[in-house]
Image (cartoon, helix red, strand yellow):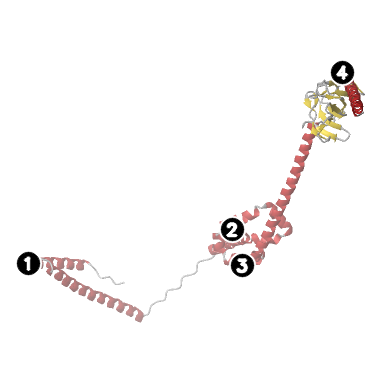
Amino acid sequence: MTNGLAFIVFSGFVALIAVLVRVLYKILAAHREALKKAAAAEAELSLVAMRVDESVSRALIPANGREVFFPKVSLPNPVYEVTVSGILRKEDGRLGDAFCTTDRAGNFSDRAWWLRVNGVCLFNSANDILESDRCTHRYTVRMDGARERLALAISHASAWSGSLEAEVVALPEGTAGVRERRERDRAERRDLEAKRRTKRETGAAAERFAEEIRALCITSEAFRNWEDFEYRRKFAEAYCEELIENQRSIRAEALKFLSQHDIIRFLRRHHPEVISRFTGRLEALQLAEVISIERALQEATSLPAPLPEKRRLTTEEVRAIKIRKQQIRDQDRVALKIDKIETRLMVRDRLEKLPLDPDEREMLEQELIGEIEEGDGDATVRTI
């Protein structure tokens, strides 16, 4: 009884396995048939895009690496918008579109670089991506064309099946290309930056200008007297020579101030008194020069003052003058005699100190005294 039941269970298990094997075989056969049909369909895909109108063409891009060519346009510098949509499938169940493939979680997050235009990746920095929708798997790219016709292909996708739908639109003549638009945008950014920089520099220059005006106005408060013409005139009269002596430094200081043309124009309109204060010394110098010339002319044209008349001396005054002169002459003679005596005594004293014989000493003494007497005889006593 037990053996019979076990045999029945075993037989049922074997039959179940056989059924599962037959089902699996049919599934694999159906899958192979589907792959063959897909390959046949891909083989039947046209390698030339279908022209919809003068500017629009459509085609299916197979995943077998074959290029699909699009019609040429008659524009000298064509600009295209390429829109690609659809999904590709891989044997391991992964999916992919024109721009992404699925990761392990099934999200379209891994970049795919297989869609190429004339051998170059469609999604490169030279082109503009206008639309990128991973949900609908639709991507639109604007690109600059060339004289040759466009050829789209999916490269490096041998294990993938299916095709992507591509639509190429030739934009109207005169449409700015990618390179032209970028250069224009760069030029606009440069112009905008230049305007901003100019605005900043202008603002900074205006602030510096205002600061210079404020500083000059504050400094001029220390020279308020120079604003008054009467003060300048009196100063020129009082310090005429000093102003003329320092005229070079005064003129240099005034020229340095007046050479600031923008500041001078502003001060003349809004603060004329500041100019008067800073140029007051120059105007005082000019007044001093006029005063100096007037003084010189006045001195040149005026007559010399007459000399005072000499007073005649009285008899007593004349007698007193003569007596005084005679006293001076007598005093001079006495002084001369005393000087001679002192000289002789000095000669005798000095000769005695010398190692000489008495006769030699006396002879030298007489000779020296004779020379002194001769000099005195030639000299005349003058009374002043």
N-term mark: 4 or 2:
4
Q: Secondary structure at mark 4?
A: helix
Amino acid tagged 4: Ala
Q: Which circle marks residue 91 in the picture? A: none
Amino acid tagged 2: Ile
Amino acid tagged 3: Lys
Q: Nearer the viewer, residue 300 or 104?
A: 104
Confirm or deny contact between disc 4 and disc 2 (CB under 8 A).
no
Quarter holding residue 102: top right
Amino acid tagged 1: Asp
Q: Nearer the viewer, residue 184 or 147?
A: 147
* Residue indicated by mark 4: 43
Q: Secondary structure at mark 3?
A: helix
Q: Position of residue 374 (x, y in %)?
A: 18, 66
Q: Secondary structure at mark 2?
A: helix
Quick check: 265 above or below 316? Answer: above
The single residue placed furthest to the front in the displayed view is: 1
Question: The N terminus appears in which quarter of the rendering?
Answer: top right
N-term mark: 3 or 1:
3
Q: Which circle marks residue 359 in the picture? A: 1
**Is residue 275 something that shows in the picture?**
no
Q: Residue at x 74, y 59 (%)?
A: 270
How far is disc 1 from disc 4 in space, using C-alphas?
Answer: 167 Å
Q: Which label lies toward us, 4 or 2?
A: 4
Q: Which label lies toward us, 3 or 2?
A: 2
Q: Residue at x 72, y 55 (%)?
A: 266
How far is disc 4 from disc 3 in space, using C-alphas?
Answer: 114 Å
Q: Position of residue 126 (x, y in %)?
A: 77, 31
Q: Position of residue 55 (x, y in %)?
A: 89, 25
